[in-house]
Amino acid sequence: MPPRLDPDRVRDAASRFPPDADGDPPPYGTAGFRAQAPILPPVLLRCGLLAAIKSLAAGKMCGVMVTASHNPEEDNGAKLIGPVGEMMSPEWEDYANRLVAAGSDDQLAAEAAAIWRQEGIDSIDEGRGGPVGGVVVGCDNRPSAGLLVEAALAGVACTGVPVVRAGLQTTPQLHFRVRARNLGQPWGEADYYDRLAMGLAKASRDLVGDAVPGRWAAVGTDGLLLDCANGVGAAKAEALIARLREAGCGWRFDVRNVGPRGLNDRVGADHVEKQRALPLGFETVAKGARCCSIDGDADRLVYFAPDGKRGLTLFDGNKIAALLALYIKDALKGMPGIAETFKVGVVQTAYANGASTNYLKTELGLQPVMTSTGVKHLHREAASFDVGVYFEANGHGTVLFSNDLIAKLRKIEYEDEAARDLLAMAEVMNQAVGDALSGMLMVECILRRKVWGLKEWEDMYTDLPSRQLKVMVADRAVIKTTDAETRCIAPDSLQQGIDAAVARRKSGRAFARPSGTENVVRIYAEAASQGEADSLAKDVARLVHKLAGGIGPVP
Ligand code: NG1
Ligand code: ZN
Protein backbone atom coordinates (compact mmCIF):
# COMPACT_ATOMS: atom_id res chain seq x y z
CA MET A 1 0.00 0.00 0.00
CA PRO A 2 1.43 3.43 -0.88
CA PRO A 3 2.13 5.73 2.04
CA ARG A 4 -0.74 8.01 2.93
CA LEU A 5 -1.52 10.28 5.82
CA ASP A 6 -4.24 8.62 7.82
CA PRO A 7 -5.91 11.21 10.09
CA ASP A 8 -7.34 8.48 12.32
CA ARG A 9 -3.88 7.08 12.88
CA VAL A 10 -2.56 10.56 13.66
CA ARG A 11 -5.34 11.14 16.22
CA ASP A 12 -4.83 7.72 17.70
CA ALA A 13 -1.04 8.20 18.00
CA ALA A 14 -1.52 11.69 19.44
CA SER A 15 -3.85 10.33 22.11
CA ARG A 16 -1.22 7.73 23.08
CA PHE A 17 1.42 10.45 23.57
CA PRO A 18 -0.54 13.42 24.92
CA PRO A 19 1.01 16.79 25.76
CA ASP A 20 2.21 17.15 29.33
CA ALA A 21 -0.14 19.40 31.30
CA ASP A 22 2.76 20.78 33.36
CA GLY A 23 5.18 21.81 30.66
CA ASP A 24 4.98 23.95 27.55
CA PRO A 25 6.48 22.28 24.50
CA PRO A 26 9.91 23.70 23.63
CA PRO A 27 10.56 25.65 20.41
CA TYR A 28 12.93 24.30 17.77
CA GLY A 29 16.26 25.64 19.07
CA THR A 30 19.87 25.87 17.98
CA ALA A 31 20.01 22.12 17.34
CA GLY A 32 16.46 20.76 17.41
CA PHE A 33 14.15 20.26 20.36
CA ARG A 34 15.48 19.98 23.89
CA ALA A 35 13.63 19.82 27.19
CA GLN A 36 13.11 17.75 30.29
CA ALA A 37 12.37 14.25 29.07
CA PRO A 38 8.82 13.88 30.53
CA ILE A 39 7.39 16.60 28.28
CA LEU A 40 8.93 15.20 25.11
CA PRO A 41 6.88 12.15 23.98
CA PRO A 42 4.37 14.27 22.00
CA VAL A 43 7.27 16.27 20.53
CA LEU A 44 9.00 13.09 19.35
CA LEU A 45 5.76 11.80 17.87
CA ARG A 46 5.61 14.98 15.81
CA CYS A 47 9.27 14.70 14.83
CA GLY A 48 8.70 11.17 13.56
CA LEU A 49 5.69 12.33 11.60
CA LEU A 50 7.56 15.28 10.11
CA ALA A 51 10.62 13.20 9.20
CA ALA A 52 8.28 10.81 7.38
CA ILE A 53 6.68 13.67 5.46
CA LYS A 54 10.11 15.06 4.59
CA SER A 55 11.25 11.66 3.38
CA LEU A 56 8.20 11.39 1.14
CA ALA A 57 8.72 14.90 -0.21
CA ALA A 58 12.34 14.07 -1.03
CA GLY A 59 11.81 10.42 -2.01
CA LYS A 60 14.77 9.65 0.26
CA MET A 61 15.60 8.38 3.73
CA CYS A 62 15.52 10.87 6.62
CA GLY A 63 16.36 10.46 10.28
CA VAL A 64 15.41 11.28 13.85
CA MET A 65 18.08 11.24 16.56
CA VAL A 66 16.82 11.15 20.14
CA THR A 67 19.41 13.01 22.20
CA ALA A 68 20.05 16.07 24.31
CA SER A 69 23.74 16.05 23.46
CA HIS A 70 25.82 17.63 26.23
CA ASN A 71 22.82 18.58 28.38
CA PRO A 72 21.99 16.82 31.68
CA GLU A 73 20.91 13.20 31.74
CA GLU A 74 17.30 14.11 32.72
CA ASP A 75 16.91 16.16 29.54
CA ASN A 76 16.33 14.73 26.14
CA GLY A 77 15.60 16.02 22.68
CA ALA A 78 15.37 15.41 18.97
CA LYS A 79 17.60 16.24 16.05
CA LEU A 80 15.97 15.87 12.63
CA ILE A 81 18.14 14.69 9.74
CA GLY A 82 17.43 15.63 6.13
CA PRO A 83 18.12 13.52 3.03
CA VAL A 84 21.75 14.56 2.53
CA GLY A 85 22.49 13.91 6.17
CA GLU A 86 22.02 17.58 6.93
CA MET A 87 20.09 19.39 9.64
CA MET A 88 16.65 20.53 8.60
CA SER A 89 16.29 23.84 6.73
CA PRO A 90 14.56 26.81 8.41
CA GLU A 91 11.40 26.08 6.42
CA TRP A 92 11.20 22.60 7.93
CA GLU A 93 12.03 23.95 11.37
CA ASP A 94 8.90 26.08 10.97
CA TYR A 95 6.91 23.00 10.08
CA ALA A 96 8.30 21.29 13.16
CA ASN A 97 7.23 24.21 15.33
CA ARG A 98 3.76 24.17 13.77
CA LEU A 99 3.30 20.48 14.53
CA VAL A 100 4.62 20.86 18.07
CA ALA A 101 2.29 23.81 18.69
CA ALA A 102 -0.73 21.73 17.59
CA GLY A 103 -2.00 20.78 21.05
CA SER A 104 -5.09 18.67 20.37
CA ASP A 105 -5.33 15.45 18.39
CA ASP A 106 -7.54 17.14 15.79
CA GLN A 107 -5.24 20.15 15.44
CA LEU A 108 -2.30 17.83 14.87
CA ALA A 109 -4.14 15.84 12.19
CA ALA A 110 -5.13 19.09 10.44
CA GLU A 111 -1.65 20.62 10.65
CA ALA A 112 0.03 17.46 9.35
CA ALA A 113 -2.45 17.30 6.47
CA ALA A 114 -1.73 20.95 5.63
CA ILE A 115 2.04 20.33 5.47
CA TRP A 116 1.43 17.16 3.46
CA ARG A 117 -0.55 19.20 0.91
CA GLN A 118 1.88 22.11 0.97
CA GLU A 119 4.68 19.70 0.04
CA GLY A 120 2.51 18.28 -2.77
CA ILE A 121 3.00 14.75 -1.58
CA ASP A 122 -0.12 13.23 -3.12
CA SER A 123 1.03 14.46 -6.49
CA ILE A 124 4.57 13.08 -6.20
CA ASP A 125 4.97 10.21 -8.62
CA GLU A 126 7.47 7.41 -8.97
CA GLY A 127 9.30 9.44 -11.60
CA ARG A 128 10.69 11.79 -8.94
CA GLY A 129 12.59 9.00 -7.32
CA GLY A 130 9.56 7.19 -6.00
CA PRO A 131 7.35 8.36 -3.20
CA VAL A 132 8.66 5.79 -0.73
CA GLY A 133 11.14 7.34 1.62
CA GLY A 134 11.99 5.94 5.01
CA VAL A 135 12.98 7.12 8.46
CA VAL A 136 15.84 5.81 10.54
CA VAL A 137 15.55 6.45 14.26
CA GLY A 138 18.52 6.35 16.62
CA CYS A 139 19.11 7.39 20.22
CA ASP A 140 21.81 8.05 22.79
CA ASN A 141 22.02 6.16 26.09
CA ARG A 142 19.72 8.33 28.22
CA PRO A 143 17.26 6.34 30.35
CA SER A 144 14.34 8.19 28.72
CA ALA A 145 15.33 7.10 25.20
CA GLY A 146 13.08 4.02 24.95
CA LEU A 147 9.75 5.80 25.30
CA LEU A 148 10.82 8.68 23.07
CA VAL A 149 11.96 6.33 20.31
CA GLU A 150 8.56 4.61 20.52
CA ALA A 151 6.86 7.99 20.17
CA ALA A 152 8.95 8.83 17.09
CA LEU A 153 8.17 5.46 15.55
CA ALA A 154 4.45 6.00 16.18
CA GLY A 155 4.75 9.30 14.32
CA VAL A 156 6.38 7.65 11.32
CA ALA A 157 3.77 4.90 11.37
CA CYS A 158 0.97 7.46 10.79
CA THR A 159 2.19 7.68 7.20
CA GLY A 160 3.07 4.08 6.35
CA VAL A 161 6.67 5.09 5.52
CA PRO A 162 9.19 2.29 6.24
CA VAL A 163 11.13 2.70 9.43
CA VAL A 164 14.57 1.51 10.50
CA ARG A 165 15.35 1.16 14.21
CA ALA A 166 19.03 2.01 14.46
CA GLY A 167 19.13 1.70 18.26
CA LEU A 168 22.08 3.29 20.06
CA GLN A 169 23.97 5.62 17.74
CA THR A 170 26.10 8.71 18.01
CA THR A 171 24.47 11.70 16.33
CA PRO A 172 27.15 11.86 13.60
CA GLN A 173 26.80 8.14 12.90
CA LEU A 174 23.12 8.59 12.18
CA HIS A 175 23.76 11.62 9.95
CA PHE A 176 26.50 9.69 8.14
CA ARG A 177 24.23 6.70 7.62
CA VAL A 178 21.32 8.72 6.22
CA ARG A 179 23.66 10.46 3.81
CA ALA A 180 25.38 7.24 2.71
CA ARG A 181 22.05 5.46 2.19
CA ASN A 182 20.79 8.23 -0.08
CA LEU A 183 24.05 8.29 -2.04
CA GLY A 184 23.68 4.56 -2.67
CA GLN A 185 26.71 3.78 -0.49
CA PRO A 186 27.01 1.11 2.23
CA TRP A 187 25.23 2.59 5.22
CA GLY A 188 25.35 0.10 8.07
CA GLU A 189 27.01 0.99 11.34
CA ALA A 190 29.93 -1.27 10.41
CA ASP A 191 30.29 0.67 7.16
CA TYR A 192 30.81 3.82 9.18
CA TYR A 193 33.74 2.23 11.04
CA ASP A 194 35.11 0.82 7.79
CA ARG A 195 35.13 4.17 6.11
CA LEU A 196 36.89 5.87 8.99
CA ALA A 197 39.45 3.09 9.36
CA MET A 198 40.19 2.90 5.64
CA GLY A 199 40.35 6.68 5.36
CA LEU A 200 42.77 6.84 8.28
CA ALA A 201 44.98 4.13 6.80
CA LYS A 202 45.36 6.28 3.68
CA ALA A 203 45.60 9.62 5.48
CA SER A 204 48.33 8.47 7.82
CA ARG A 205 50.29 6.91 4.99
CA ASP A 206 52.59 4.37 6.60
CA LEU A 207 52.00 5.30 10.21
CA VAL A 208 49.05 3.09 11.07
CA GLY A 209 51.01 -0.07 11.61
CA ASP A 210 53.45 1.48 14.05
CA ALA A 211 52.64 0.96 17.69
CA VAL A 212 54.90 3.52 19.36
CA PRO A 213 57.55 4.64 16.92
CA GLY A 214 60.54 6.13 18.65
CA ARG A 215 60.43 9.36 16.73
CA TRP A 216 57.01 10.17 18.18
CA ALA A 217 57.82 8.99 21.64
CA ALA A 218 60.27 11.90 21.71
CA VAL A 219 57.40 14.39 21.51
CA GLY A 220 55.11 12.37 23.74
CA THR A 221 52.64 11.36 21.06
CA ASP A 222 52.40 7.77 22.11
CA GLY A 223 48.82 7.47 23.26
CA LEU A 224 45.52 9.25 23.74
CA LEU A 225 43.24 9.26 26.77
CA LEU A 226 39.64 9.64 25.67
CA ASP A 227 36.89 10.93 28.01
CA CYS A 228 33.56 9.68 26.62
CA ALA A 229 31.26 11.70 28.93
CA ASN A 230 29.60 8.41 29.98
CA GLY A 231 27.66 8.70 26.74
CA VAL A 232 26.82 6.63 23.72
CA GLY A 233 30.19 7.54 22.21
CA ALA A 234 32.01 5.21 24.62
CA ALA A 235 30.79 1.96 23.09
CA LYS A 236 31.12 3.43 19.61
CA ALA A 237 34.68 4.59 20.24
CA GLU A 238 35.52 1.10 21.41
CA ALA A 239 33.98 -0.40 18.26
CA LEU A 240 35.93 2.06 16.13
CA ILE A 241 39.20 1.27 17.92
CA ALA A 242 38.56 -2.46 17.44
CA ARG A 243 38.11 -1.81 13.72
CA LEU A 244 41.31 0.24 13.63
CA ARG A 245 43.16 -2.64 15.25
CA GLU A 246 41.89 -4.99 12.54
CA ALA A 247 43.18 -2.52 9.97
CA GLY A 248 46.60 -2.72 11.58
CA CYS A 249 46.54 0.48 13.62
CA GLY A 250 48.72 0.18 16.69
CA TRP A 251 47.97 3.60 18.16
CA ARG A 252 47.20 3.46 21.84
CA PHE A 253 43.83 4.67 23.12
CA ASP A 254 42.74 4.64 26.75
CA VAL A 255 38.93 4.95 26.76
CA ARG A 256 37.48 6.36 29.99
CA ASN A 257 34.11 7.51 31.39
CA VAL A 258 32.26 4.78 29.55
CA GLY A 259 29.00 5.03 31.53
CA PRO A 260 26.33 3.99 31.80
CA ARG A 261 25.61 6.50 34.64
CA GLY A 262 26.84 10.04 35.11
CA LEU A 263 26.19 11.26 31.58
CA ASN A 264 27.74 14.72 31.07
CA ASP A 265 28.12 15.10 34.83
CA ARG A 266 31.50 16.83 35.33
CA VAL A 267 32.75 14.92 32.31
CA GLY A 268 32.73 15.46 28.57
CA ALA A 269 33.61 18.15 26.07
CA ASP A 270 31.17 20.79 27.34
CA HIS A 271 32.47 20.50 30.91
CA VAL A 272 36.09 20.69 29.81
CA GLU A 273 35.53 23.59 27.44
CA LYS A 274 33.21 25.72 29.57
CA GLN A 275 34.58 24.98 33.06
CA ARG A 276 38.19 24.60 31.95
CA ALA A 277 38.26 21.72 34.42
CA LEU A 278 39.52 18.15 34.20
CA PRO A 279 36.78 15.57 33.71
CA LEU A 280 36.15 13.16 36.57
CA GLY A 281 38.48 10.20 36.31
CA PHE A 282 41.39 12.31 35.02
CA GLU A 283 42.56 13.71 38.38
CA THR A 284 45.74 11.65 38.47
CA VAL A 285 46.62 11.77 34.79
CA ALA A 286 50.20 12.91 34.26
CA LYS A 287 50.96 16.52 33.43
CA GLY A 288 51.08 17.13 29.69
CA ALA A 289 49.42 13.81 28.72
CA ARG A 290 47.43 13.97 25.51
CA CYS A 291 43.72 13.75 26.38
CA CYS A 292 40.47 14.50 24.61
CA SER A 293 36.80 14.73 25.56
CA ILE A 294 33.72 14.10 23.48
CA ASP A 295 30.17 15.06 24.48
CA GLY A 296 27.11 12.93 25.23
CA ASP A 297 26.21 12.24 21.60
CA ALA A 298 29.80 12.40 20.28
CA ASP A 299 29.49 15.36 17.95
CA ARG A 300 31.87 17.62 19.91
CA LEU A 301 35.57 17.14 20.47
CA VAL A 302 38.10 19.08 22.51
CA TYR A 303 41.65 18.14 23.42
CA PHE A 304 43.38 19.01 26.67
CA ALA A 305 46.53 18.39 28.66
CA PRO A 306 46.47 18.33 32.49
CA ASP A 307 48.74 21.07 33.84
CA GLY A 308 49.73 19.10 36.95
CA LYS A 309 47.83 21.51 39.22
CA ARG A 310 44.33 20.14 38.57
CA GLY A 311 43.92 22.62 35.71
CA LEU A 312 44.46 22.07 32.02
CA THR A 313 45.62 23.48 28.72
CA LEU A 314 42.65 23.47 26.37
CA PHE A 315 42.68 22.76 22.64
CA ASP A 316 39.18 23.84 21.68
CA GLY A 317 37.32 23.81 18.38
CA ASN A 318 39.28 26.82 17.16
CA LYS A 319 42.62 25.14 17.83
CA ILE A 320 41.36 22.02 16.06
CA ALA A 321 40.18 24.13 13.10
CA ALA A 322 43.55 25.89 12.94
CA LEU A 323 45.40 22.55 12.88
CA LEU A 324 43.14 21.19 10.14
CA ALA A 325 43.42 24.40 8.11
CA LEU A 326 47.21 24.35 8.41
CA TYR A 327 47.29 20.74 7.23
CA ILE A 328 45.10 21.58 4.24
CA LYS A 329 47.22 24.60 3.37
CA ASP A 330 50.36 22.46 3.54
CA ALA A 331 48.79 19.81 1.31
CA LEU A 332 47.87 22.48 -1.21
CA LYS A 333 51.49 23.65 -1.32
CA GLY A 334 52.21 20.25 -2.83
CA MET A 335 49.85 20.95 -5.72
CA PRO A 336 51.17 24.15 -7.32
CA GLY A 337 49.16 25.34 -10.27
CA ILE A 338 46.05 23.45 -9.20
CA ALA A 339 45.68 24.56 -5.61
CA GLU A 340 45.12 28.20 -6.63
CA THR A 341 41.86 27.14 -8.29
CA PHE A 342 40.43 25.78 -5.02
CA LYS A 343 38.41 27.96 -2.70
CA VAL A 344 39.46 27.20 0.86
CA GLY A 345 37.49 28.73 3.72
CA VAL A 346 37.19 28.61 7.49
CA VAL A 347 33.91 29.39 9.22
CA GLN A 348 33.72 30.51 12.85
CA THR A 349 31.27 32.09 15.27
CA ALA A 350 31.69 35.04 17.61
CA TYR A 351 32.81 32.56 20.30
CA ALA A 352 36.00 31.93 18.33
CA ASN A 353 38.90 33.34 20.30
CA GLY A 354 40.22 36.50 18.65
CA ALA A 355 43.72 34.98 18.58
CA SER A 356 42.48 32.09 16.41
CA THR A 357 40.84 34.45 13.94
CA ASN A 358 44.04 36.44 13.81
CA TYR A 359 46.14 33.29 13.22
CA LEU A 360 43.96 32.20 10.29
CA LYS A 361 44.28 35.64 8.74
CA THR A 362 47.91 36.40 9.28
CA GLU A 363 49.59 32.97 9.24
CA LEU A 364 47.41 31.08 6.79
CA GLY A 365 46.17 33.95 4.63
CA LEU A 366 42.55 32.92 5.13
CA GLN A 367 39.67 35.30 5.78
CA PRO A 368 37.39 33.53 8.28
CA VAL A 369 33.66 33.87 7.70
CA MET A 370 31.54 34.56 10.81
CA THR A 371 28.05 33.14 11.30
CA SER A 372 25.47 32.93 14.06
CA THR A 373 25.85 30.20 16.69
CA GLY A 374 24.63 26.75 15.73
CA VAL A 375 26.37 24.36 13.40
CA LYS A 376 23.56 24.48 10.88
CA HIS A 377 24.70 28.05 10.05
CA LEU A 378 28.37 27.15 9.91
CA HIS A 379 27.74 24.05 7.86
CA ARG A 380 25.78 25.91 5.21
CA GLU A 381 28.50 28.52 4.89
CA ALA A 382 31.31 25.92 4.76
CA ALA A 383 29.52 24.06 1.98
CA SER A 384 30.02 27.07 -0.30
CA PHE A 385 33.80 26.42 -0.44
CA ASP A 386 35.74 23.65 -2.21
CA VAL A 387 37.27 22.88 1.16
CA GLY A 388 35.29 24.38 4.02
CA VAL A 389 36.56 24.00 7.59
CA TYR A 390 34.06 24.89 10.27
CA PHE A 391 34.24 24.61 14.01
CA GLU A 392 32.49 26.10 16.97
CA ALA A 393 34.73 26.85 19.92
CA ASN A 394 32.94 24.06 21.80
CA GLY A 395 34.44 21.51 19.42
CA HIS A 396 31.60 20.88 17.00
CA GLY A 397 32.76 20.93 13.40
CA THR A 398 34.17 19.16 10.39
CA VAL A 399 35.78 19.75 7.00
CA LEU A 400 33.55 19.66 3.92
CA PHE A 401 34.81 18.90 0.42
CA SER A 402 32.79 19.90 -2.66
CA ASN A 403 31.82 17.21 -5.17
CA ASP A 404 33.57 19.23 -7.79
CA LEU A 405 36.85 19.18 -5.91
CA ILE A 406 36.58 15.46 -5.13
CA ALA A 407 36.12 14.77 -8.85
CA LYS A 408 39.19 16.90 -9.70
CA LEU A 409 41.30 15.18 -7.04
CA ARG A 410 40.27 11.74 -8.22
CA LYS A 411 41.59 12.53 -11.69
CA ILE A 412 45.07 13.19 -10.38
CA GLU A 413 45.25 10.95 -7.33
CA TYR A 414 47.53 8.35 -8.91
CA GLU A 415 50.34 10.78 -9.60
CA ASP A 416 49.69 13.30 -6.83
CA GLU A 417 50.38 12.51 -3.19
CA ALA A 418 48.76 15.72 -1.94
CA ALA A 419 45.56 14.88 -3.82
CA ARG A 420 45.55 11.48 -2.12
CA ASP A 421 46.00 13.14 1.26
CA LEU A 422 43.02 15.41 0.69
CA LEU A 423 40.85 12.55 -0.57
CA ALA A 424 41.79 10.55 2.51
CA MET A 425 40.89 13.51 4.70
CA ALA A 426 37.47 13.67 3.02
CA GLU A 427 36.98 10.02 4.00
CA VAL A 428 38.01 10.49 7.60
CA MET A 429 36.09 13.72 8.17
CA ASN A 430 32.35 13.13 8.37
CA GLN A 431 30.82 14.94 5.39
CA ALA A 432 27.37 15.18 6.94
CA VAL A 433 28.00 16.83 10.31
CA GLY A 434 30.62 17.48 13.00
CA ASP A 435 31.85 14.17 14.40
CA ALA A 436 34.06 13.82 17.47
CA LEU A 437 35.38 10.38 16.56
CA SER A 438 36.29 11.27 13.01
CA GLY A 439 37.82 14.57 14.16
CA MET A 440 39.85 12.72 16.76
CA LEU A 441 41.31 10.37 14.15
CA MET A 442 42.23 13.28 11.90
CA VAL A 443 43.90 15.23 14.71
CA GLU A 444 45.85 12.13 15.75
CA CYS A 445 46.88 11.58 12.16
CA ILE A 446 48.05 15.16 11.66
CA LEU A 447 49.99 15.35 14.93
CA ARG A 448 51.74 12.09 14.13
CA ARG A 449 52.51 13.05 10.56
CA LYS A 450 53.90 16.38 11.62
CA VAL A 451 55.75 14.72 14.51
CA TRP A 452 54.08 17.24 16.77
CA GLY A 453 53.32 16.94 20.44
CA LEU A 454 50.77 19.12 22.20
CA LYS A 455 53.43 21.75 22.80
CA GLU A 456 53.91 22.40 19.08
CA TRP A 457 50.15 22.52 18.58
CA GLU A 458 49.72 24.88 21.51
CA ASP A 459 52.39 27.17 20.10
CA MET A 460 50.44 27.79 16.88
CA TYR A 461 48.92 30.77 18.70
CA THR A 462 48.08 31.79 22.24
CA ASP A 463 44.43 32.32 23.11
CA LEU A 464 43.41 35.66 24.50
CA PRO A 465 42.06 35.14 28.03
CA SER A 466 38.28 34.72 27.87
CA ARG A 467 35.30 34.07 30.12
CA GLN A 468 31.79 32.76 29.48
CA LEU A 469 28.89 33.30 31.89
CA LYS A 470 25.18 32.51 31.87
CA VAL A 471 22.49 34.86 33.20
CA MET A 472 19.07 33.50 34.11
CA VAL A 473 16.26 35.77 32.86
CA ALA A 474 12.47 35.50 32.87
CA ASP A 475 12.29 35.65 29.08
CA ARG A 476 15.46 35.30 27.06
CA ALA A 477 13.59 36.49 23.92
CA VAL A 478 13.80 40.10 25.16
CA ILE A 479 17.42 40.06 23.95
CA LYS A 480 17.59 40.64 20.21
CA THR A 481 20.86 40.57 18.29
CA THR A 482 22.35 41.41 14.91
CA ASP A 483 25.70 41.04 13.05
CA ALA A 484 26.11 37.29 13.61
CA GLU A 485 24.86 37.80 17.18
CA THR A 486 27.72 40.11 18.12
CA ARG A 487 25.56 43.18 18.84
CA CYS A 488 22.34 43.63 20.81
CA ILE A 489 19.53 45.72 19.36
CA ALA A 490 17.19 45.13 22.33
CA PRO A 491 16.69 45.92 25.14
CA ASP A 492 17.47 49.59 24.65
CA SER A 493 20.83 50.82 25.86
CA LEU A 494 22.24 47.34 26.52
CA GLN A 495 24.64 47.58 23.59
CA GLN A 496 25.83 51.04 24.63
CA GLY A 497 26.58 49.62 28.06
CA ILE A 498 28.51 46.70 26.58
CA ASP A 499 30.47 49.02 24.29
CA ALA A 500 31.45 51.21 27.22
CA ALA A 501 32.55 48.17 29.28
CA VAL A 502 34.58 46.82 26.35
CA ALA A 503 36.26 50.19 25.79
CA ARG A 504 37.61 50.12 29.36
CA ARG A 505 39.63 46.91 28.66
CA LYS A 506 42.75 46.32 26.61
CA SER A 507 41.95 44.17 23.53
CA GLY A 508 38.41 43.80 24.91
CA ARG A 509 35.55 42.11 23.06
CA ALA A 510 32.22 41.01 24.53
CA PHE A 511 28.71 40.09 23.51
CA ALA A 512 25.47 38.71 24.95
CA ARG A 513 23.00 36.46 23.14
CA PRO A 514 20.01 34.35 24.14
CA SER A 515 20.81 30.63 24.20
CA GLY A 516 18.91 28.48 21.73
CA THR A 517 19.12 25.41 23.95
CA GLU A 518 18.68 26.65 27.53
CA ASN A 519 16.63 29.36 29.14
CA VAL A 520 19.60 31.64 29.73
CA VAL A 521 21.45 34.56 28.19
CA ARG A 522 25.05 33.69 27.38
CA ILE A 523 27.84 36.21 27.93
CA TYR A 524 31.23 36.02 26.24
CA ALA A 525 34.17 38.28 27.00
CA GLU A 526 37.84 38.34 26.11
CA ALA A 527 40.62 40.78 26.94
CA ALA A 528 44.37 41.07 27.26
CA SER A 529 44.44 39.59 30.78
CA GLN A 530 42.30 36.98 32.54
CA GLY A 531 41.40 39.52 35.22
CA GLU A 532 40.09 41.95 32.61
CA ALA A 533 38.20 39.23 30.72
CA ASP A 534 36.57 38.11 33.99
CA SER A 535 35.60 41.60 35.06
CA LEU A 536 34.33 42.46 31.57
CA ALA A 537 32.12 39.34 31.55
CA LYS A 538 30.82 40.29 34.99
CA ASP A 539 30.03 43.84 33.90
CA VAL A 540 28.09 42.57 30.89
CA ALA A 541 26.29 39.99 33.06
CA ARG A 542 25.25 42.79 35.45
CA LEU A 543 23.93 44.87 32.54
CA VAL A 544 21.96 41.95 31.13
CA HIS A 545 20.60 41.11 34.55
CA LYS A 546 19.44 44.68 35.06
CA LEU A 547 18.07 45.44 31.59
CA ALA A 548 16.71 42.05 30.53
CA GLY A 549 14.89 40.95 33.67
CA GLY A 550 17.46 38.78 35.43
CA ILE A 551 16.32 36.17 37.93
CA GLY A 552 18.31 35.27 41.03
CA PRO A 553 21.86 36.44 41.72
CA VAL A 554 24.19 37.88 39.08
CA PRO A 555 26.73 35.13 38.24
P1 NG1 B 1 23.21 27.83 22.59
O1 NG1 B 1 22.58 27.28 23.83
O2 NG1 B 1 22.27 28.39 21.56
O3 NG1 B 1 24.33 28.75 22.93
C1 NG1 B 1 24.78 25.67 22.39
C2 NG1 B 1 26.16 25.99 21.91
C3 NG1 B 1 26.16 25.98 20.40
C4 NG1 B 1 25.63 24.68 19.85
C5 NG1 B 1 24.32 24.29 20.54
C6 NG1 B 1 23.82 22.94 20.18
C7 NG1 B 1 27.80 27.50 22.91
C8 NG1 B 1 28.13 28.89 23.31
N1 NG1 B 1 26.59 27.32 22.35
O4 NG1 B 1 23.88 26.60 21.84
O5 NG1 B 1 27.44 26.25 19.95
O6 NG1 B 1 26.58 23.65 19.96
O7 NG1 B 1 24.40 24.38 21.97
O8 NG1 B 1 24.39 21.91 20.88
O9 NG1 B 1 28.61 26.59 23.09
ZN1 ZN C 1 26.44 16.96 20.99
Image (spheres, rainbow, N blue to C red):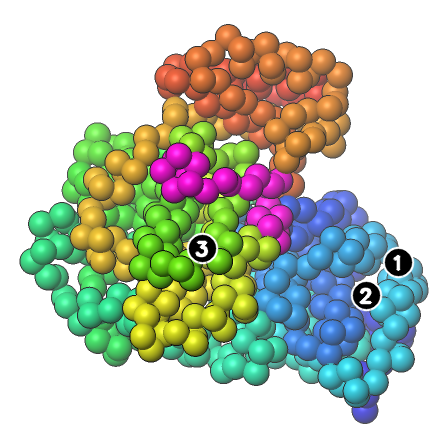
Q: What residue did someone put label 2 on?
A: 14
Residue 312, percent from left and from top: 28, 35
Q: What residue did someone put label 1 on?
A: 104
- Quarter of the picture containing the N terminus is bottom right
Amino acid carrying mark 2 in the image: Ala
The answer to whether residue 413 is above or below residue 264 is below
Q: Which is more toward the observer, 468 or 77?
A: 468
The answer to whether residue 404 is above or below residue 478 is below
Task: Name the image quarter holding residue 54.
Answer: bottom right
Task: Name the image quarter holding residue 50.
Answer: bottom right
Q: Are marks 1 and 2 in contact (CB under 8 Å)?
A: yes
Residue 508, percent from left and from top: 48, 18
Query: Residue at (84%, 80%) from the top-left corner?
Result: 124
Magenta region, residue range: 359-381
Query: Residue at (43%, 75%) from the top-left corner?
Result: 410
Residue 399, percent from left and from top: 46, 57
Q: What residue did someone put label 3 on?
A: 340
